[in-house]
Amino acid sequence: MDFQSARRVVLQLLGTTAPADVPALLNWMRTTRDFDEFTHDNNDIMLKNIADDLRKCLPVEAVLCSEHLALQEIRQQPEPTVHVDAFLYDEDFIDTLCEEGKMSRNYCTVCGSHRTAPLGFISHSFSLTELKFIYHHVLPDLSGKVLVDVGSRLGTVLYGGYLYSSAVQLCGVELNGQFCQLQEMIIKKYQFGDRIKVLHADICTQSSLLQTADVIVMNNVFEYFLTEAQQASAWNYIIHNVRKQGSLLVTVPSLQESLMGLQINVQLSSWVEEIPLSLDVYSQRDIDQEALQQIHLYKVL
Ligand SMILES: C[S@@+](CC[C@H](N)C(=O)[O-])C[C@H]1O[C@@H](n2cnc3c(N)ncnc32)[C@H](O)[C@@H]1O
């Protein structure tokens, strides 16, 4: 059925609905999430277009020369590791790059020989699958809510939130000015400015934002970018300011893992309660469950 015929059928249906029920039906059509499955495809395509745009502005490894600590951390991993941004490069894309000789999944264990071992991959962004999991299955309806992404980098959490949630405001805070410029470019091109805002700032200067946010996302935010002393100080700042009762924290990895070995003066159990997540929705599908298992949800007490 083409658009004009489908439109006629919808109008006919409204015409045959009991008049007293029309307002309820129209309200349901305006607010329901039952149509999500029909609109998600468009949103996925839009996110893939954004990834295309960003890839053109970044080197393949998507780490900037100014990110000294992040580059050093990658070099210091126990096994040879490369940064492959999961938002920019999905599995199929990596396969294509490997076939073209532009990327490799393996490294040579003995220089000059054919003996190879798998390279470790690190991503500094959520993949499309992780974003959809977070907005469709981890978080509740975000109508009227304010979400803050601590360390927004390429802006993936913000664009995902714009397309997959009803959050009224999505605010990214990013330390690196070049990444803020990239986010501004995308926000302008895709006209996301009515709900997305990016601040070029250290999160440790944003107490009121943290105090008022309803959802705070923290994806490996400090681990690769700050020294241990700086990480401890940043986490103490977060713990001190994220106090709004009932607000939600989405973290990768778990808070226990992020705080392990750092000088933190708080008992987690007196600050937050973990909300268990179910991966059942994905059990039948060909999806990287390991990445999803790293996502944790907490409610502030
Ligand atoms: C792993 S990336 C997360 C990217 C993004 N949130 C996502 O999930 O796709 C972490 C980002 O946090 C930024 N960052 C680290 N410390 C920060 C701080 N104190 N304030 C603001 N941003 C910070 C880094 O520059 C980096 O771009």
Image (cartoon, rainbow, N blue to C red):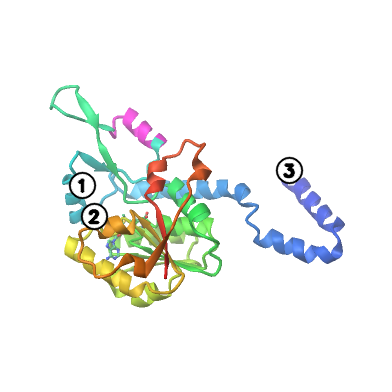
Q: Which residue is mark 2?
A: 224
Q: Are marks 2 and 1 in contact (CB under 8 Å)?
A: yes
Spatial CA distance of label 2 from label 1 is 8 Å
Ligand 1 within 8 angstroms of badge 2 C-beta: yes
Label whose residue precedes the other's in the sequence (2 or 1): 1
Element on which disc 1 rests: helix
Q: Are marks 2 and 3 in contact (CB under 8 Å)?
A: no
For label 1, the crowd category at 10 Å Cα-Cα, with few meaning under 14, some 14 to 19 and many 20 or more, is some
Residue 124 at x, y percent in the picture: 31, 51
Q: Nearer the viewer, residue 284 or 36?
A: 284
Label whose residue precedes the other's in the sequence (2 or 3): 3
Can residue 26 be spotted in the picture? Answer: yes
Left or right: 229 as drawn, with respect to 59: left
Amino acid bearing label 3: Asp
Q: Which residue is mark 1?
A: 74
Q: Quadrant for the N terminus, please.
A: top right
Q: Is residue 234 above or below residue 65?
A: below
Q: Nearer the viewer, residue 203 or 5?
A: 203
Ligand 1 within 8 angstroms of badge 3 C-beta: no
Q: Residue at x 32, y 59 (%)?
A: 255
Q: Which residue is mark 3?
A: 2
- Mark whose residue sits in front, 2 or 3: 2
Stretch in magenta: 92-104
Residue 88 at x, y percent in the picture: 38, 45
Spatial CA distance of label 2 from label 3 is 51 Å
Can residue 201 be spotted in the picture? Answer: no
Q: Nearer the viewer, residue 57 or 194?
A: 194
For label 3, the crowd category at 10 Å Cα-Cα, with few meaning under 14, some 14 to 19 and many 20 or more, is few
Q: Is residue 196 magenta?
A: no
Label whose residue precedes the other's in the sequence (1 or 3): 3
Characterize the magenta stretch by its predominant secondary structure: helix
Amino acid bearing label 2: Tyr
